[in-house]
């Protein structure tokens, strides 16, 4: 016995938990507790904690006697509170069993409704409600849902039975079935369960409850839940809560119903009462897509009192949580019940607008506002929209479920979508309706189109969370998933692989491939929001850019300089590669210098273009880094070419050239080139390369200065391991600078620093700082050399490591704080102990990853540098690092 509390009761205006207990109760349980304490109409129940889920797995996937005893006690309390008993034939208690993790995972885990019904209690429900149709409708729903979730009998197999019965009776809707129809359906369902599972459908209500609780815990580790956590960077060790709650029924007639609401529009962020509602329906009907729901405003016409109460509660919830809420409700015979509330999933555009609007409304301050937008959501705003000059041929319209423009080829299944995407195709997933098992296909698709479902359907909610454009509930199309055909109203058909374009903002679908243009990001809510982030953050944000065009894109996105300009990328251009190869093939210094003279003016012009774009900002140029063999043809490729030339008896001179090239490639071949003759080692053994590059950089700086450009060049020496290596290269740069400044008749201030990317450089950072005027951490190579992983080969096992818990995150994507991060921190401390004003940044892939950016802020770096399209993400992440500190310290609360 641990004497630990695992089960928390809520009901009658009091809950044992509260809204800040998401770690223990999960998001849904915390929301139910908070709403109960706030006096809202919440059906009573109890939450089994996430700790119980963890204990379930630790106890060989079974509940301990201690946890079971607490569940039994909570159930007894619930039965006493309501005057009903689970399994009682006269007055049966019916409950729902729902999952609820700390972080919202819509549709990824399992739910069971109407639990407690069996062949005897259904008669008790019938007598109690005097509504046989309702009672048998609940029972058939329970069999279908329980069998799917607990007994592994797929839901769609029951849907086929329902569809056949509709065809036999000539009806279209579930609401057209009679009580007798449902009784026949129940018998068919039970027979199917027996045939499919080899087991009878359980009749004991306590057994049903235990099986359902276990199934919800099991769903924490189902394939789609694991995939969703991987996609959204949610830890795998949190576990899910289980919420057992008294059933209320939206399917008791036309004065009952269920719905989903948002306090603001989750697609646009507009402040409006937004959601969907179905009369005479349970909540699953609203999100499943089997019936197209009505807009929430329609509820005002049929249930005005409940509608007014819902409006008031909606406003209370938003003001209580100071964030946009997503809630579920049921109306049973005119009485409103709240079943859930949580911070609502929203698009990037909606998140930015809501943050700005709530700031204006005084609900949040600037620190809280920047935390309302997830950094990755900004990515949704940085990509193209449809060009208005397109010839728009509308093939179908539907609901604007998730905004954005998408162009791609039709795929009808998630498996086909994954296969097509792996073959380099852009995919639009077209489905009758999506379900949680489609998560893999949805992840790789550029857009999603469904024939059924509403704004709160699975497709809509998940697409909005992923930032994927989606048009849902298009009645203009008929999708035949078995034949893989889309039939349009005008008789035309589309097949797998046909191109379509969809606008998730307008809810329109077009034939063919449309052109897109870049969005305007300099004004409106986005521009204002980014100014707020800049006001808050301490960390600078630069970009990695090698050409003026990329530098301009980054500057437009708010980059404050270039943290990494890779000079080697300039040598791969067709008009330069031949000179680079001549330099490599040269046998003497004179020959190398002659080839480098050809490259000098080209490099100089490149740098001048970048300096012009970055007028007033620093530009860090890395000297040549990769091994020389990368600029030469591959060994196997040359051998094939040479064999063909000899076979065709080609020109002997040409054969000799290829033989010389092959010989040089053989000479340069290295067993481990990433740790071989590269970086500063090239500049030391071939100092003429460093001289040419330093001259190109400084001549370009002088010429740009003469044009009135405020140039701030920083010359970075790569891959040093000893201070002697850096000193050797710095001396060459300083010698060249003296010559250039004398020739140009002016001096330009510049810095010489180094990349810190191998452990020895970290350990000797104090010595290195005696020479270096700045450090820039190359965390890609530092991760390689710290872990001993080859970045090019680690993909073969990294995924396995992540799936099996060997690594929590891919260290090449998210900085390893406990290992690589400690080296970075050590280097900062040792470097600044020698040179207190040492400027330090990071220029690996981690510079645009939010978790890594936060770490860089915490250890006191001056800046991060990332690819152009990740600059806004890094700006927001840097601001959020400050906001979190302020709020945790109690100085950032409103």
Image (spheres, rainbow, N blue to C red):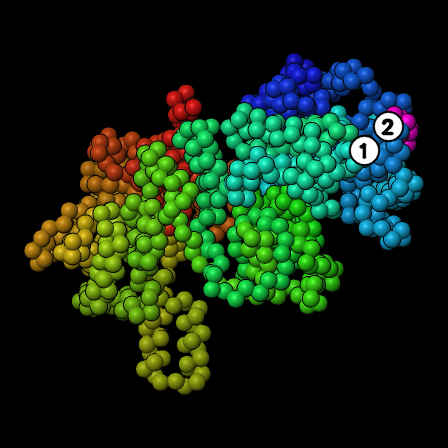
Name the residue tied to disc 2: 129
Tell me if residue 199 can be seen: yes
Classify 10 Å Cα crowding around label 2: few (below 14), some (14-19), many (20 and above): few
Distance, label 2 to label 1, CA atoms, is: 9 Å
Residue drawn at (47%, 40%), measured in percent from left and top? 353
Q: Say whether residue 571 is left or right of residue 476.
A: left
The part of the chain drawn in magenta is 119-128
Q: Answer with mark 2 or mark 1, whichever residue precedes in sequence.
A: 2
Quadrant into which the N terminus falls? top right
Q: Position of residue 638 (x, y in %)?
A: 41, 72
Q: Is residue 300 magenta?
A: no
Classify 10 Å Cα crowding around label 1: few (below 14), some (14-19), many (20 and above): many
Residue drawn at (52%, 66%), measured in percent from left and top? 391
Residue drawn at (83%, 20%), measured in percent from left and top? 85
Name the residue tied to disc 1: 252
Q: Is residue 120 magenta?
A: yes
Q: Nearer the viewer, residue 171 or 616?
A: 171
> What SS does tag 2 mark?
helix
Q: Is residue 446 above or below residue 814?
A: below
Q: Say whether residue 809 is left or right of residue 251.
A: left
Q: Position of residue 750 (x, y in %)?
A: 18, 47
Tell me if residue 56 can be seen: no
Quadrant into which the C terminus falls? top left
Q: Say whether residue 117 is left or right of residue 408.
A: right
> What SS does tag 1 mark?
loop
Residue drawn at (43%, 32%), measured in percent from left and top? 359
| Magenta part, dominant SS | helix
Q: Position of residue 887 (x, y in %)?
A: 42, 25
Q: Nearer the viewer, residue 331 or 1?
A: 331
Q: Nearer the viewer, residue 876 or 587?
A: 876
Check if mark 2's residue and mark 1's residue have beta carbons within 8 Å.
yes
């Amino acid at each position: 016995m641990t004497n630990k509390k695992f089960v928390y009761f809520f009901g009658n205006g009091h809950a044992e938990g509260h809204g800040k207990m998401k770690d223990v109760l999960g998001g849904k349980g915390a929301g139910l507790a908070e709403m109960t304490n706030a006096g809202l109409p919440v059906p009573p129940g109890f939450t089994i904690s996430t700790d119980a889920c963890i204990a379930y797995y630790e106890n060989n996937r079974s509940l301990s006697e201690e946890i079971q005893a607490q569940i039994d006690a909570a159930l007894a309390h619930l039965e006493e509170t309501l005057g009903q008993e689970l399994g009682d034939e006269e007055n049966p208690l019916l409950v729902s069993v729902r999952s609820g993790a700390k972080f919202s995972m819509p549709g990824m885990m399992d739910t069971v409704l109407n639990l407690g019904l069996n062949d005897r209690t259904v008669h008790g429900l019938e007598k109690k409600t005097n509504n046989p149709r309702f009672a048998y409708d609940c029972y058939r729903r329970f069999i279908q849902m329980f069998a799917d979730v607990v007994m592994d009998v797929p839901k769609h197999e029951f849907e086929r039975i329902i569809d056949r019965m509709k065809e036999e009776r000539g009806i279209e809707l579930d609401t057209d079935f009679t009580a007798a129809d449902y009784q026949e359906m129940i018998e068919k369902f039970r027979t199917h369960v027996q045939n499919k599972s080899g087991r009878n459908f359980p009749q004991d209500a306590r057994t049903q409850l235990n099986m359902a609780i276990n199934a919800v815990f099991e769903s924490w580790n189902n394939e789609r839940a694991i995939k969703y956590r991987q996609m959204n960077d949610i830890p795998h060790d949190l576990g899910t809560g289980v919420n057992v709650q008294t059933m209320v029924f939206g399917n008791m007639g036309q004065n009952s119903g269920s719905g989903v609401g948002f306090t603001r529009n989750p697609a646009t962020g507009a402040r409006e009462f937004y959601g969907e509602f179905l009369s005479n329906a349970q909540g699953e009907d609203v999100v499943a897509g089997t019936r197209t729901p009505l807009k929430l405003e329609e509820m005002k016409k049929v249930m005005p009192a409940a509608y007014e109460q819902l409006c008031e509660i909606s406003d209370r919830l938003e003001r209580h949580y100071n964030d946009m809420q997503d809630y579920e409700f049921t109306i049973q015979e005119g009485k409103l019940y709240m079943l859930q509330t949580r911070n609502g999933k929203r698009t990037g555009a909606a998140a930015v607008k809501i943050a700005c609007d709530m700031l204006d409304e005084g609900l949040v301050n600037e620190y809280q506002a920047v935390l309302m937008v997830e950094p990755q959501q900004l990515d949704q705003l940085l990509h193209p929209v449809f060009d208005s000059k397109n010839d728009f041929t509308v093939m179908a319209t539907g609901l604007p479920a998730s905004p954005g423009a998408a162009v791609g080829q039709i795929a009808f299944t998630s498996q086909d979508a994954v296969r097509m995407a792996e073959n380099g195709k852009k995919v639009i997933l077209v489905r009758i309706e999506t379900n949680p098992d489609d998560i893999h296909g949805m992840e790789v698709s550029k857009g999603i189109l469904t024939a059924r479902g509403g704004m709160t359907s699975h497709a809509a909610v998940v697409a909005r969370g992923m930032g994927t454009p989606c048009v849902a509930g298009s009645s203009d199309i008929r999708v035949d998933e078995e034949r893989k055909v889309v039939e349009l109203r005008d008789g035309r058909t589309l097949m797998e692989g046909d191109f379509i374009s969809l606008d998730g903002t307008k809810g329109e679908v077009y034939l063919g491939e449309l052109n897109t243009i870049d969005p305007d990001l300099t004004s409106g809510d986005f521009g204002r929001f980014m100014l707020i982030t800049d006001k808050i953050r301490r960390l600078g944000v630069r970009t990695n850019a090698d050409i003026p065009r990329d530098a301009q894109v980054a500057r437009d996105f708010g980059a404050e300089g270039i943290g990494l300009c890779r000079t080697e990328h300039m040598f791969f251009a067709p008009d330069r590669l031949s000179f680079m190869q001549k330099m490599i093939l040269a046998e003497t210094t004179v020959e190398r210098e002659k080839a480098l003279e050809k490259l000098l003016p080209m490099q100089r012009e490149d740098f001048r273009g970048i300096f012009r774009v970055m007028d007033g900002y620093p530009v860090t140029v890395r000297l040549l880094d990769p091994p020389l063999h990368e600029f030469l043809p591959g060994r196997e490729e040359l051998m094939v070419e040479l064999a063909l030339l000899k076979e065709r008896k080609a020109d002997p001179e040409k054969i000799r050239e290829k033989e010389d090239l092959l010989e040089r490639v053989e000479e340069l071949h290295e067993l481990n080139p990433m740790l071989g003759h590269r970086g500063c080692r090239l500049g030391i053994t071939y100092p003429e390369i460093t001289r040419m590059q330093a001259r190109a950089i400084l001549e370009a700086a002088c010429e740009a200065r003469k044009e009135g450009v405020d140039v701030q060049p920083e010359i970075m020496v790569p891959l040093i391991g000893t201070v002697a290596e850096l000193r050797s290269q710095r001396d060459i740069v300083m010698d060249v600078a003296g010559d250039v400044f004398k020739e140009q008749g002016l001096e330009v201030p510049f810095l010489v620093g180094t990349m810190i990317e191998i452990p020895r450089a970290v350990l000797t950072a104090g010595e290195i700082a005696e020479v270096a005027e700045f450090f820039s951490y190359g965390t890609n190579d530092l991760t390689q050399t710290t872990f001993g992983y080859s970045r090019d080969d680690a993909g073969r096992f990294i995924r396995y490591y992540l799936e099996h818990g060997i690594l929590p995150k891919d260290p090449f994507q998210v900085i390893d704080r406990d290992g690589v991060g400690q080296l970075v921190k050590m280097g900062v401390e040792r470097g600044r102990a020698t040179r207190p004003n040492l400027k330090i940044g990071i220029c690996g892939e981690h510079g645009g990853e939010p978790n890594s950016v936060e770490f860089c802020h915490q250890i006191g770096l001056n800046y991060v540098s990332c690819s152009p399209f990740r600059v806004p993400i890094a700006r927001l992440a840097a601001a959020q690092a400050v906001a979190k500190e302020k709020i945790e310290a109690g100085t950032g609360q409103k």
